[in-house]
Image (cartoon, grey):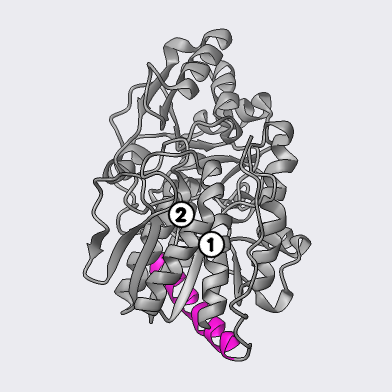
Amino acid sequence: MRISMVSEHASPLVDPGGPDAGGQNVHVRELALALARAGHDVTVCTRRDDPAAPEVVPLTGSVRVRHVPAGPAGPMPKDDIAAHVPELSAALEEAWRADRPDVVHGHFWMSGWAAAGPARRLGLPLVQTYHALGAVKRRHQGAADTSPEGRIRIEAAVARRADRVVASCPDEAAELIRLGAPLGALVTVPSGVDTSLFRPGPAREPTGRPRLLVLGRLVRRKGVDETVQALAGVPDAELVVAGGSGPGGDPDVDRLQEVAARAGVADRVRFLGAVRRDAVPGLLRSADIVVCAPWYEPFGIVPLEAMACGRPVVVTAVGGLQDTVRDGRTGLHVPPRDPDALAAALRELAGDPVRAAALGAAGRRRVVERYGWDRVAERIAGVYADAARAARRRAPLPVSDRRPRVAAAS
């Protein structure tokens, strides 16, 4: 198949760790590469955020990234992209009329919004993956949620318009049903892990100090603040925080340094800043325990990558983490926003290296059995085929189709 993916803010060329760069960047890149290995041809369309960037950047012979105009060609917070979705949509339609794909796959709500009209007018099958849902974000962040005003309404409209809607886990599937996604269009396929890159290897030399690791975006909802606070209850352990731009000028790091100072653990927290993708497996293997303690998480790739490296994980029992990490078998669950419970779980594993090693080994087996990217890509290709059959059964949308409007973030 000739596949056009749309990932408006999460370019597969960008490593995760920045304010708007995370698991979606990894997911889109690895899924595209796995589909190419299976013989498909993939173009990933993402917003142009650099005027000097080439229009098309090859990843492999069968995967390329196309930079599409949508607003000023410079960095932009992803919530602000909503005002430029009509331009993105028009550019996608022009590209698809000139070079018609067999299927379109939207990643994130704005990508689905931009793709839905052109896909229907051109009779193209549309598959949608949300990666995060506005209703869940609003529930957990309340007034701190910066999403554009129309997000939830548009997510529901895209779910009804798509030929297939992909949930990453049962928890997200339930949320999509509440949103109004048609049951006949809904399918659950998890994200994946490159099990040849993320694999067990030599551990670091023992230092007598357990090393805890947090990896990813440092925004408040990711629970790094609670992890820093929990360190006060794990004597002698050190915490390595990978993500953001490092000390000096990064408001998230500045905030976390203040949290560490108040908790009396500033001398045991080290901030690495952003880490290159090829350095992540070694970083994970250097940890005794990998921590992922978000308030909510649609799926969560980092715990799977840690499990693939044979490292034990402690995660909050939210979203997809409830499914990917088996409590007491491949890692430990704790309640969200509870530093004391997190500290207790970390002390338990830090004090029992034999059990920690057993959890890590079980985690590796689970990832290999269920979450390899080639297996995930095979299932997604089946979803594409189902979407194509569904698209053939429906009539094209009239050219006068009206796009829903969205208010810009205040």
Q: Position of residue 178 (x, y in %)?
A: 78, 61
Q: Secondary structure at mark 1?
A: helix
Q: Quadrant of residue 323?
A: bottom right
Task: Check contact, mark 2 vs mark 1: CB within 8 A.
Answer: yes
Q: Position of residue 71 (x, y in %)?
A: 44, 47
The amino acid sitting under disc 1 is Ala
**Residue 189 visible in the displayed image:** no
Q: Is residue 136 left or right of residue 357?
A: right
At a point 49% along the width and 40% down the height, the residue shown is 356
Q: Position of residue 159 (x, y in %)?
A: 66, 67
The amino acid sitting under disc 2 is Glu
Q: Is residue 78 left or right of residue 158?
A: left
Mark 2 sits on what residue? 8
Q: Earlier in the sequence, mark 2 or mark 1?
A: 2
* Mark in the foreground, 2 or 1: 1
Q: Nearer the viewer, residue 309 or 383?
A: 383
At a point 26% along the width and 60% down the height, the residue shown is 56
* Residue range corresponding to the magenta coloring: 373-392
Q: Quadrant of residue 222?
A: top right
Q: Residues within 10 Å of mark 1 (few under 14, many from 20)?
A: many
Q: Secondary structure at mark 2?
A: loop
At a point 32% along the width and 61% down the height, the residue shown is 66
Residue 114: mark: 1
Is residue 370 in the magenta section? no
Question: What secondary structure predominates along the stretch shown in magenta?
Answer: helix
Q: Position of residue 60 (x, y in %)?
A: 23, 65
Q: Is residue 361 left or right of residue 262?
A: left
